[in-house]
Amino acid sequence: MSYQESVSAELNLLVSKCEIQSFILQNYKAKLAIEICNELKVSLIKFAANRLALGGVINELGIIQLDKNKATAILNANFIKLSIVRNKIKKLNAIKKENPIKKEKKEVKPKNTYVNHEGVYKNEAREKMVNAIASIDSPIGIIPTLPSFTCKLESLILEKIGRGISFIGCERDFDTFHKMVNTIAESTILRRTIVPKFGEIGDVIFNAKKDNFAHLILDYCGTINSFHKEIEYAIQNDLVKINGTLSITLSKNGIGNNIGIVGKLLRQFPDGCFGDEKETEIGVKLFFNKVMKPNYKVETFFNYFDSSPMMLIIVRRIE
C-alpha cells in the first residue's frame, strides 16, 4: 500500500468514526443501543468500538450511559484529526497534479479470513512470539497453531530453531484451509513439519493432556470472550511443557464492561475504577490473573494496532 493509499484509508476510517460517534452522542438519551446500531446499519462490533471510544457503557436495559462533556471532547479531538488528514490529502493531490505518474495496475488481494500478513506491527508481534519460543531452555516438540494461509509465523520459527519442532495447523474456514494446504504442499520444509487440521483448535486443546505440547500459538485475533475457556483449560491442565509458552493474540474491539468474561471480572470493581479507555486491557489482565497458577508468569503484554487495536500476551510455564 502506497503512502497516499494509507492516508486515504485513514481518512475513510476517521470519517466513519466521526459519523457514528456523532450519531451516538446525539441520540444516546433518546434511543436504545440496538436501535442506534440498526439505524446506523453497522455491525455490533463496530458500534461497540465507537461507543467504547466515547467512554459509553450499556446498562441492563440497553440504554447507553456516558459523560456528555467527556464524549464531546473525544469527538472534537477526532474532528481535529479528520481535518489534519484532509489537509494531507489536499497536499498529496496537489503534488500528484504537478508531477503526474503512470498509473500502475492495482493488485487485487485474495479474499481470506485474515489478509494483513505484512503489517509492521503484526511483524513485531510475530518477532516477539518467535523469540519467546526460541529462548534458552524452551522445549521442542509439537506446537498447535492457527496459521495464516501463508504460514509465515511457522516458517520464521523453523528458520530460527531448525529441527525438533512440528505444528498442528488448525483452520476452520474451508477456503483459507484450502489455501493453507496449498502453501504447505509447495514447501518441502512445511510438508515435513505442519499437519493441517480442518476445524477448531479448541478440539485439539480439550482433547490434550499434561505436557502434550512444547508451545501453543493461539493467534485468535478475536475477543477473549470467544476463547477464554480454551486458554483457561490449557493453563489449568499444564498442556505445554515446563518453559513452554502460550502466545495469545486478542482483539480489543467489541468488548464492553458488561459483556462476557471481561464484564464479569470488571463488575467486581466500582464503576470507573480503572477508567473507561483501559477497560478491555484491564479486563484481560484480570482474566489471566484469575486463571494462572503459581507455575506460570506473563512474560509479554504487547499492545499494537493491526487494522484494529490488538494485544499479544505471552505466558510461560516456569515449573
Image (spheres, rainbow, N blue to C red):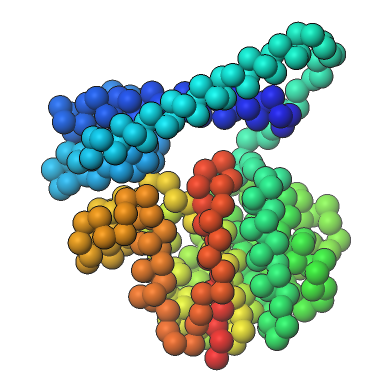
Q: Is residue 162 above or below residue 73?
A: below
Residue 282, quarter of picture:
bottom left
Q: Nearer the viewer, residue 142 or 216?
A: 216
Would you place residue 209 above or below residue 194 in this image?
A: below
Point out residue 82 in the picture as x, y percentages from the top left corner. Answer: 50, 25
Q: Position of residue 298 (x, y in %)?
A: 51, 75
The quadrant in which residue 290 appears is bottom left
Q: At x 51% / y 22%, what residue is drawn?
A: 83
The residue positioned 55% from the left and 24% from the top of the image is 84
The quarter of the displayed image where residue 272 is located: bottom left
Say whether residue 41 is left or right of residue 213: left
Instruction: Tell me if residue 116 comes above or below residue 304 in the rendering.
Output: above
Front residue of 286 and 244: 286
Residue lying farthest to the top in this orientation? 97
Question: Residue at left 29%, top 39%?
Answer: 70
Tell me: 116 left or right of 81.
right
Q: Nearer the viewer, residue 305 or 78?
A: 78
Residue 314 visible in the snapshot: yes
Left or right position of 108 against 50: right
